Amino acid sequence: MPDIDVGTRTFAYAEVRTGTRQIKIWIKGDNRGAQQYKFDPDPHGDDWYNKNQAAFYRTAATKLAEMFNTKGSFPRYGKSKIEINKTTYALNEPPK
């Protein structure tokens, strides 16, 4: 699982493959636990995603980490969006 340094924190993230594309992100060395998001729309509809999955997840994790550092918490489900390669993705709760 890759790490990224954003601000003064180190975040780890992973792609979650469960039929829908999701990301799991957490702060290394922090006991708050991980946050997981389902992307809407499904990134597979974007040819760029299909050829650049590592860059897609790194960009998503960086944006989520920046949001955490700004607000002190990860975004709530359905309340935030991120743009990656000119596509806007809602950050929704993963199916249970």
Image: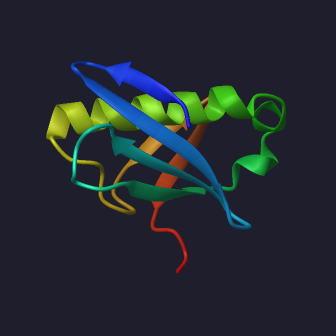
Q: Position of residue 13 (x, y in %)?
A: 49, 40
The reply to whether residue 85 is visible in this rendering is no
In the displayed structure, does residue 27 sit left or right of residue 57?
A: left
Q: Image height check: is 18 above or below 74?
A: below
Considering every residue shown, the one lying at the far left of the view is 72
Locate the N terminus by quadrant: top right
Which quarter of the figure has residue 57?
Answer: top right
- The residue at 52%/69% (across/down) is 94
The reply to whether residue 43 is visible in this rendering is yes
In the displayed structure, does residue 32 sit left or right of residue 52?
A: left
- The residue at 22%/54% (across/down) is 32
Q: Image height check: is 17 above or below 56?
A: below
Q: Position of residue 63 (x, y in %)?
A: 41, 31
Q: Position of residue 96 (x, y in %)?
A: 52, 81
Residue closer to the observer: 41 or 3: 3
Q: Position of residue 83 (x, y in %)?
A: 52, 34
Considering every residue shown, the one lying at the far bottom of the view is 96
- The residue at 43%/28% (across/down) is 62
- The residue at 69%/66% (across/down) is 18
In the displayed structure, does residue 33 sit left or right of residue 78?
A: left
